Amino acid sequence: MKINNIFRPLNTPTQNEVFEKLLNTSDFRLEKIVSTGQATPPGEWYEQEQDEWVILLSGSAGLLFETENTLQVLHPGDYVHIPAHQRHRVEWTDSSQPTVWLALHYRHPK
């Protein structure tokens, strides 16, 4: 049994967000995401097939939902449920420190 740590630093610096699958089954995917100043490209929106529950563990980020006009600012401990097909975008992530997310992607049982 190997013990891991969610805050383990990245082995190599990168200009891109890093996605690390922690658990993956036919029903859900749990992943760690590390952002270092990245944002959704202008004019683009995420629209996922699965629901997503995400918690911010460190850093900070600004989320914008297409159905809302207000930017939602997330700080450590803040979490949000994003229903499937809810268009959203990451307006910014902290560039002075890593922003660590824990994201659970899942489908509702039928």
Image (spheres, rainbow, N blue to C red):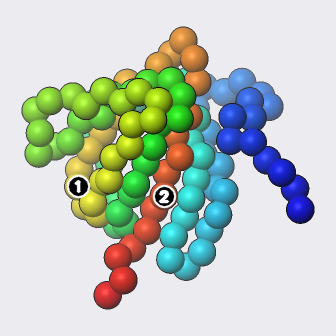
Residue at image position (65%, 49%) is: 20
Residue at 48% across, 58% down: 104
Task: Answer few, some or many: residues within 10 Å of disc 2's Cα (few below 14, many 20 plus, some between 14 and 19).
Answer: many
* Left or right position of 84 against 37: left
Farthest front residue in view: 77
Report crowding for label 1: few under 14, some 14 to 19, many 20 or more residues within 10 A (C-alpha): some
Q: Is residue 57 visible?
A: yes
User: Which residue sits furthest bottom?
Assistant: 110
**Tag of residue 86:** 1
Rendering coords of residue 5 (x, y %): 75, 42
Q: Residue 25 at x, y = what percent?
A: 60, 75
Reply above or below: 85 against 16.
below
Distance (Cα) linking label 2 and label 1: 15 Å
Left/right of residue 103 with respect to residue 65 in the rendered view: right
Given the image, on which type of amino acid does mark 2 rest?
Answer: Leu
Whole-percent x and y of residue 87? 23, 50
Q: Which mark is residue 75?
A: none
Q: From the image, which quarter does the C terminus lie in?
A: bottom left
Query: Vertically, is 10 above or below 53?
Result: above
Q: Secondary structure at mark 2?
A: strand
> Residue placed at 21% from the left, 28% from the top?
71
Amino acid on which the number 1 mark rests in the picture: Gln
Of the pair 41 and 22, the residue shown nearer to us:
22
Quadrant where the N terminus sits is bottom right
Residue hosting label 2? 104
- Asked if residue 91 shows in the view, the reply is no
Q: Is residue 50 above or below residue 58?
A: below
Q: How many marks can you see? A: 2
